[in-house]
Image: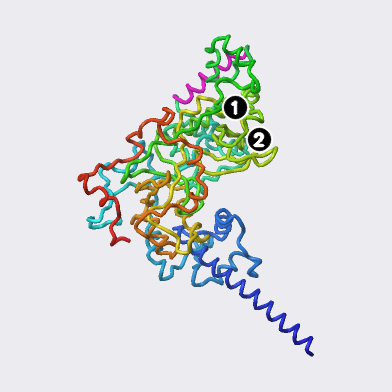
């Protein structure tokens, strides 16, 4: 009897422990699901909830751990979190039920309007926009900023341009051609577009749609077509000489006196390194933005609200990066260049600037550490993330590709700190959803240890949505009115390690007017006071 009683007590204890784990897991999951659904103004289907949870948390919904067979069965057990609706076509849509701490955020997101679809060559920000100050009657809103169209990542734009570089394509054939060329479908809906036509219309500066008897024909604009034609002619003329088969930049070697070239070949231990290969140089950063500057940004890579990287939306930045990626793909895709710029083992060392091929595209990277004989960890200077790649994928970077400053800007959200010392997974998840595939307005506060602290605002809503306010109202952050040095960047900031401040190498220009809207101080003595948001808003 005693043995039986002990076994029963042990069974009850194990069951209680397992039940406690499930209850804790369910509570965490409720917060994550509510954050995801609040950030999705139109709601999500069960399938979309599964996909986005997997994309953000990097693991599937814990259905089995909680004893559920499907996502729909899971959400039916969250009546205080999820409202299940039915669309006109019968599709089930999941929407968030706001609690006391999130009703304000839910209202803001619910008021979001469809973004303007009209193509425009001008920036959406108006020149008379003002920075909120303590004396503002409504310190929580900017003056009117026009709504923006959805944004395609630079890599996807470059892929579409490359796809059309050979010949025009019918709109009806574009999806199949993209799948055949790149081995995956173009999932334009995840970027906020409703059709392929809208995608192409957003690229009206480089792509035009012509109506023909066969249907809508998608072609590159004439100036791009002429550039490609010139490259093809140049390549055809150079076929007789194998050393000149690589387009662009290779003529630089021909200008070197023959005696110097022979001398370099005799110098050990790197006789095969091309003269235009970057060996001991670094990329420069973009020029610093002025305080109180309003700038259009896209958040490219996120670790937390205290550690993320942005791209600036302007012709001087994102457009030039697209052109660079296209040119690098054309150059390094030739076998001569692929062999000529191979890096010897002696050059594969931490801090070396080079380029790497991933999925048939070339990116500028800096070697962060050597993992083993086959692998290295590299930092993507134009995107902000670290990744382990094969050594065989590396190539020397040509000098020509050193001119464009590193495009990724390390950032932290201004005036916030996590309530728990470290950002919770739910807070990071919400921040990622707020930023995902949107062009946002950034308000520059200051630089701290090379990290840009800025406020982020989604102006595509009826009421501007400030991300620091969202995190505060959700209970994930404290708004402290000052910028606390990022703990994450304090542990590792590759940009500070490998990217030189603007102008150190003389290859970085001045911030162009269309890169941001600079606001001049009316009273120099009161400049510091006007940089902070009103305490009433906080």
Magenta part of the chain = 223-239
The percent position of residue 481, horizontal first and vertical second, equals: 34, 58
Foreground residue among 534 and 359: 534
> Which quadrant would residue 10 be assigned to in this image?
bottom right
Foreground residue among 389 and 202: 389
| Left or right of 122, for residue 344 | right
Whether residue 36 is visible, yes or no, is no
- Which residue is painted at 71% across and 84% down in the image? 9
> What is the distance, in whole Å, between disc 1 and disc 2 at their CAs?
16 Å
- On-image quarter of the C terminus: bottom left
The percent position of residue 514, horizontal first and vertical second, equals: 34, 36
- In the image, is residue 467 part of the stretch drawn in magenta? no
Q: Which residue is mark 2?
A: 391
5 vs 285: above or below: below
- For the residue carrying disc 2, how many other residues have a C-alpha within 10 Å: few (<14), some (14-19), or many (20+)? many
The percent position of residue 287, horizontal first and vertical second, equals: 38, 36
Q: Which residue is mark 1?
A: 332
> Which quadrant would residue 267 be assigned to in this image?
top right
Main SS category, magenta section: helix
233 vs 173: above or below: above
Residue at disc 1, secondary structure: helix
Foreground residue among 379 and 46: 379
- On-image quarter of the N terminus: bottom right
The percent position of residue 303, horizontal first and vertical second, equals: 51, 51
């Amino acid at each position: 009897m005693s043995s039986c009683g002990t076994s029963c007590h042990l069974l009850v204890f194990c069951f209680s422990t397992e039940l406690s784990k499930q209850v804790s897991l369910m509570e965490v999951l409720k917060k994550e699901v509510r954050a995801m659904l609040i950030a999705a103004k139109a709601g999500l289907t069960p399938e979309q909830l599964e996909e986005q949870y997997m994309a953000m948390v990097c693991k599937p919904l814990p259905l089995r751990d909680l004893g559920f067979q499907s996502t729909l069965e899971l959400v039916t057990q969250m009546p205080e979190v999820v409202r299940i609706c039915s669309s006109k076509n019968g599709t089930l849509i999941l929407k968030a039920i706001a609690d006391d701490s999130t009703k304000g955020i839910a209202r803001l997101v619910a008021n979001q309007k469809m973004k303007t679809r009209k193509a425009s060559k001008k920036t959406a920000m108006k020149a008379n926009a003002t920075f909120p100050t303590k004396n503002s009657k409504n310190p929580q809103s900017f003056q009117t900023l026009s709504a923006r169209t959805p944004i395609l990542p630079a890599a996807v734009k470059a892929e579409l341009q490359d796809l059309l570089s050979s010949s025009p394509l019918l709109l009806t054939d574009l999806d199949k051609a993209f799948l055949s060329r790149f081995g995956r479908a173009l999932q334009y809906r995840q970027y906020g577009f409703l059709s392929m036509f809208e995608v192409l219309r957003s690229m009206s500066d480089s792509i035009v749609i012509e109506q023909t008897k066969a249907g809508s024909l998608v072609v590159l604009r004439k100036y791009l077509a002429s550039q490609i034609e010139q490259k093809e002619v140049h390549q055809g003329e150079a076929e007789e000489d194998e050393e000149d088969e690589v387009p662009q930049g290779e003529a630089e070697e021909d200008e070197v006196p023959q005696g110097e070239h022979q001398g370099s070949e005799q110098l050990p231990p790197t006789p095969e390194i091309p003269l235009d290969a970057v060996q001991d140089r670094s990329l420069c950063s973009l020029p610093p933005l002025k305080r109180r500057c309003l700038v259009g940004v896209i958040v490219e890579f996120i670790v937390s609200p205290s550690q993320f990287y942005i791209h600036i939306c302007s012709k001087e930045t994102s457009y030039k990066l697209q052109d660079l990626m296209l040119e690098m793909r054309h150059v390094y895709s030739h076998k001569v260049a692929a062999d000529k710029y191979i890096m010897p083992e002696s050059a594969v060392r931490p801090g070396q600037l080079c380029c790497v091929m991933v999925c048939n595209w070339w990116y500028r990277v800096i070697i962060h550490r050597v993992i083993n004989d086959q692998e290295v960890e590299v930092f993507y200077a134009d995107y902000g993330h670290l990744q382990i790649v094969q050594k065989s994928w590396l190539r020397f970077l040509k000098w020509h590709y050193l001119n464009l400053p590193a495009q990724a800007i390390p950032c932290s959200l201004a005036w916030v700190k996590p309530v728990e010392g470290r950002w919770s997974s739910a807070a990071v998840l919400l921040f990622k959803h707020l930023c995902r595939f949107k062009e946002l307005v950034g308000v520059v506060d200051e630089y701290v240890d090379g990290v840009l602290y800025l406020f982020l605002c989604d102006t595509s809503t009826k009421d501007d949505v400030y991300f620091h306010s969202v995190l505060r109202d959700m209970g994930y952050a404290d708004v402290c009115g000052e910028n606390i040095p990022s703990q994450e960047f304090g542990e590792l900031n590759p940009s500070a390690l490998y990217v030189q401040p603007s102008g150190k190498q003389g290859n970085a220009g001045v911030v162009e007017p269309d890169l941001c809207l600079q606001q001049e101080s009316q009273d120099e003595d009161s400049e510091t006071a006007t940089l902070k948001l009103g305490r009433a808003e906080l």
